Each structure stands twice: as structure tokens, then as C-alpha cells.
Image (cartoon, rainbow, N blue to C red):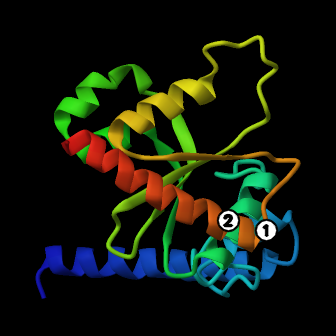
Amino acid sequence: MDEITLGFLAAAIAVGSLLFYLGHRLGKGRASGTRSQRRFAGAHLEPATDVDPQTRFDAADRPRQYRLLNSSEQELYHRLCEAMPSMKIFAQVGVAQLALARSRQEAKRLSRMAGRGVDFVVCDSDFSIVAAIELAWPNTGEELDSAEDVKRVALQSLGIPMIVFRPNKLPDADIIVREIADAIRRRNRLEVERNG
């Protein structure tokens, strides 16, 4: 062997020995230190026991305060899914996105709605939009141009009926089914008006 090859071989043996030594030291020191230090130090040696198999995130590391839906919205979402198992329910959809689904001209016309959204959008199995659902407290009566009314008018111009439920009076499955049936009739009427 030439001198260069022997030098590389000696360096590889030295690095391998160092890695073995460090791995052995980390293995012994695993029982001490904080939980996160132990998890980081021994991550390559033993699997974590509290890792969610679907996301591979440690349950303790997931932030709990950042949720897409608050508790009332979560409850309504589950009730919507239960009442309409064949429908698709989407949460936190922007009005501008709904306008863009109609056409670019509609999106441009409703550009002022950027940043405003509805809590849920209900679609048929073919993903055609049936209705938008908003979970909101009633207006005080003083607000003539409330956010709810602005959304309702914008959605109506797109041919999408809006249903409003109140957080302190969440509907049961029968009410949801009746409201959606009524929304389908309104949607069909709005489509006739838009095309007629």
C-alpha cells in the first residue's frame, strides 16, 4: 500500500474509534440529564415511546394552544360530519378562495374580502359547494354593516347560501339536515338568478 492509502486508513480507524467512544459515553450518560437531553442524546440508540406514529412528533413537543378550530367550532364540525356523512366539510375557508373557485373575475370583484373567511364550507360528494356555515354571536343591532352581513352578500353574489349558527345554541343533527336542505334550495334558486 502506498503512504496516502495508509494515511486514509489510519484516519478512518481513528474517526471510527472516536465515534465508538462517544457513542459509548452517550449511552452511559443517557440516564442523567433532562428528558429532552436524553431524548436527543439517545435518539439513534432507542426509539421514543411517546411518539405519535402518524406524525412522528413527540406528544410533549406539540403546541396545544394553536388550534385551527376553537371548542365550539370543533363541536359543530363533529355535528356536521355526523348529520351529513356523505358530504365533505371544510374548515376555515377564505371568501376570496370561494370567489376564485367561481372565476378569476369574481375573485377580482371580491378582492376586498381578502382575509375574511367562513368557518365551514359544505360540499357534495363531487365537491360542488352547497353552503357556507358561520358560527357567530348575534349582532348588537347597532352594527349596520356587520362582518356577517358583508360575508352573506358576497357569498350570495357567488351563488353560495350562508347559514349562521350561534355558539351558545349549537344545532342538533335534525336542524342541520333541515338547514342544509334549505340551503340547497336557495343555492339552486341563486344559480337560476345568476344564469337567468
Few, some or many C-alpha atoms within 10 Å of disc 1 (few <14, some 14-19, many ≥20)?
Answer: few
Q: Where is residue 122 in the image (x, y as percent from the top left)?
A: 50, 61
Residue 66, label in figure: none
Q: Considering depth in this image, is 180 or 119 the residue closer to the camera?
A: 180
Assign the C terminus to one quadrant of the image: top left
Point 79% across, 77% down: residue? 30
Disc 2 residue type (three-letter): Ile
Residue 176, label in figure: 2
Few, some or many C-alpha atoms within 10 Å of disc 2 (few <14, some 14-19, many ≥20)?
Answer: many
**Residue identified by numbered label 1:** 172
Q: Where is residue 154 in the image (x, y as percent from the top left)?
A: 42, 30
Disc 1 residue type (three-letter): Asp
Q: In this view, does 170 lie above or below 181?
A: above
| Element type where label 2 sits in the image | helix
Quarter of the image where one finds residue 63: bottom right
Q: Can residue 131 be seen in this view?
A: yes
Contact check, label 2 and label 1, Cβ < 8 Å: yes
Quarter of the image where one finds residue 175: bottom right
State left or right for residue 103 relative to residue 95: left
Q: Where is residue 21 in the image (x, y as percent from the top left)?
A: 61, 79
| Mark 2 to mark 1 CA distance (whole Å) | 6 Å
Query: Farthest left residue?
Result: 2
Point 83% across, 67% down: residue? 35
State left or right for residue 154 relative to residue 135: left
Q: In this view, does 177 lie above or below 103?
A: below
| Element type where label 1 sits in the image | loop
